[in-house]
Image: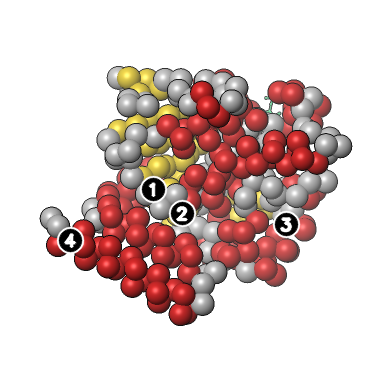
Amino acid sequence: MGDASTNGRPETVEIPPETGVPVPGLEEAGLLLDVDGPVATVTLNRPERRNAMTFATWRGLAAIGRSLPAEVRVVVLRGAGPSFSAGIDLGMFSGEGGGLPDGSDPEAADRFIAELQEGYTWLRRPDLVTVAAVHGHAIGAGFQLALSCDIRVVADDAKFCMKEPALGLVPDLTGTKPLVEIAGIGRALELCLTARTVPADEAARIGLAETLVPRDGLDAAVRDLVGALLAVDAGASAATKRLLRQAAGNTLEQQSAAERREQIGRLRDLSAR
Ligand code: ACO
């Protein structure tokens, strides 16, 4: 897709036909996409439902990830209205939007969930830095969306809750790994298995918020962060994100080797300029 917005108006994202997935337009997905040069802003846009998410939302997010212009370096995710997101649209438990799979065909259910997870996994791509601007409630799938981003800027009215276990489910939108990495296994267990609500000040204390700001300072804080991210060399940014993302899973020896490899690439790039 060459141009994701026209005069500031979001357009339907084009889906590569080979995916074979009937992905609806962004409006139906409850999403707005604005692309301004190197910055894409994705707005969860069902404020009357507190930005509750449907299968269409997750497919729409995946479609955005596949369709972003190559010049985009920073993606901001935000919510319209009083909340970041109230998580899965509870109507889906009663069959709306096709309903949840019943698990009787494990392979089909696995494929189905994997397809939805794609809406979250692209946020970890090294060529992008992804920023969640969180205010109000971030519940369940909404909390996991914030966890999938590289950096969370959090307003002081934010409230996080991993509600899935209270509903008989597990968090399956790729949130368990970053939650454990950020908060540690004990805190992750406590938060998930009580499904309690974490206020913004505690979120900042346990590492869920990189920056905590007053509600009316959220947009300015995100703007400042985006400016600082764009001021750093794009190639070095991508290489450093690749390194940092693999650090926890590597031995010191593996990580040192990865640093050397990335640095050689950087040196080659710098000397060719
Ligand atoms: N699914 C569908 N509709 C929702 C959802 C949701 N997840 N959350 C809110 N809404 C709707 C409400 O039904 C209400 O609709 P109405 O105006 O027709 O009555 C409207 O959005 C506003 O909601 P309120 O509850 O009035 O708003 P308030 O700001 O007081 O509370 C809150 C917001 C805390 C988010 C509350 O709505 C809530 O607890 N929602 C359910 C959250 C939830 O359990 N999500 C599932 C998580 S698990 C997962 O994501 C896998």
132 with respect to 58 (left or right): left
Nearer mark to the viewer, of 4 and 1: 4
Nearer mark to the viewer, of 1 and 2: 1
C-alpha distance separating marks 4 and 2: 26 Å
Which residue carries the number 4 mark? 270
Question: x and y percent of residue 248 in the render?
Answer: 52, 70
194 with respect to 45 (left or right): right
114 with respect to 65 (left or right): right
Nearer mark to the viewer, of 3 and 2: 2
Q: Is mark 3 within 8 Å of ligand 1?
A: no
Is tag 3's residue or tag 2's residue first in the polypeptide sequence?
Answer: 2
Q: Nearer the viewer, residue 171 or 214?
A: 171
Which residue carries the number 1 mark? 128
The type of residue carrying mark 1 is: Leu
The type of residue carrying mark 2 is: Asp
User: Any mark on residue 192, and which?
Assistant: 3
**Quadrant that contains the C terminus:** bottom left
Nearer mark to the viewer, of 3 and 4: 4
The type of residue carrying mark 3 is: Cys
Q: Nearer the viewer, residue 19 or 135?
A: 19
C-alpha distance separating marks 3 and 1: 29 Å
Question: x and y percent of residue 182 in the render?
Answer: 56, 64
Nearer mark to the viewer, of 3 and 1: 1
Residue 264 visible to the viewer: yes
Q: Residues within 10 Å of mark 4 (few under 14, many from 20)?
A: few
Is tag 4's residue or tag 1's residue first in the polypeptide sequence?
Answer: 1
C-alpha distance separating marks 4 and 1: 20 Å
Element carrying mark 3: helix
Element carrying mark 2: loop
Which residue carries the number 2 mark? 150
Residue 201 visible to the viewer: no
